[in-house]
Amino acid sequence: MKALTQCWFTRMHVLAGRAHREEDGSHTGYCRHCERAIVSWDRSRWFLADGFNVTHLAETVGGRFLFVLDSFEEAVIARYPVPEGADAAALEALRKDLAERHSIDRPGSGLELHDSGAPVRRRTAAAQRVPALSRGGRFSAPA
Ligand SMILES: [Zn+2]
């Protein structure tokens, strides 16, 4: 590990340069302090993308995902696709299932569930574009 960087103390990673807009609505880039891969959904809070194949994000067909974030490690630990056409009840059931599976609601777990489809902004034309190559191997379980 490198010498402790500013963000190690502040737990605030700062985007260096431009963020890359991913098909799933997230943004990826590198932290200017620790130079590690980071990911954000609102471009204000950045999380380490360790344990998470950032390149894979760009190759994933656009869609909605639920992410489990470890707020202590500031890292994404799991990512689950939301089934196409899932209604509010189905989404709620999925959230509940994931919360249980990861013990997210346990006090002090430090885990947060984020929804890539939650932001109010509308999907752009780019986000709706389906990549020519659609690979398997999507994240379905924590590493
Ligand atoms: Zn950093």
Image (spheres, rainbow, N blue to C red):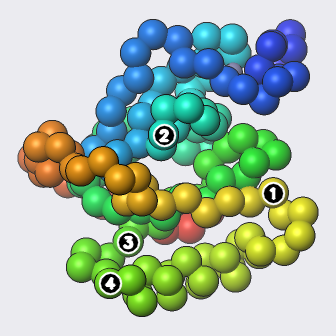
Give the structural element (helix, strand or loop) at label 1: loop
Q: Residues within 10 Å of mark 3 (few under 14, many from 20)?
A: some
Mark 1 and mark 2: Cα distance apart in space? 19 Å
Q: Taking the image as four quarters, which one is ligand 1 found in?
A: top right
Mark 4 and mark 1: Cα distance apart in space? 28 Å
- Tell me the residue at 56%/67% (across/down): 141
Res. 82 mark: 3
Name the residue at the front extreme.
120
Q: Residues within 10 Å of mark 2 (few under 14, many from 20)?
A: few
Which one is closest to the eye, mark 4 or mark 1?
4
From the Cβ of disc 1, is ligand 1 less than 8 Å away? no
Res. 110 mark: 1
Labels 1 and 2: the sequence-earlier one: 2
Labels 1 and 3: the sequence-earlier one: 3
| Residue type pointed to by label 4 | Asp
Quarter placement of the N terminus? top right
- Tell me the residue at 42%/35% (across/down): 27
| Residue type pointed to by label 2 | Asp
Above or below for 104 versus 128: below
User: Which sits in the foreground, 91 or 22?
Assistant: 91
Q: Is residue 10 visible?
A: yes
Q: Is residue 137 visible?
A: no
From the Cβ of disc 2, is ligand 1 less than 8 Å away? no
Q: Which residue is mark 4?
A: 87
Quarter placement of the C terminus? bottom right
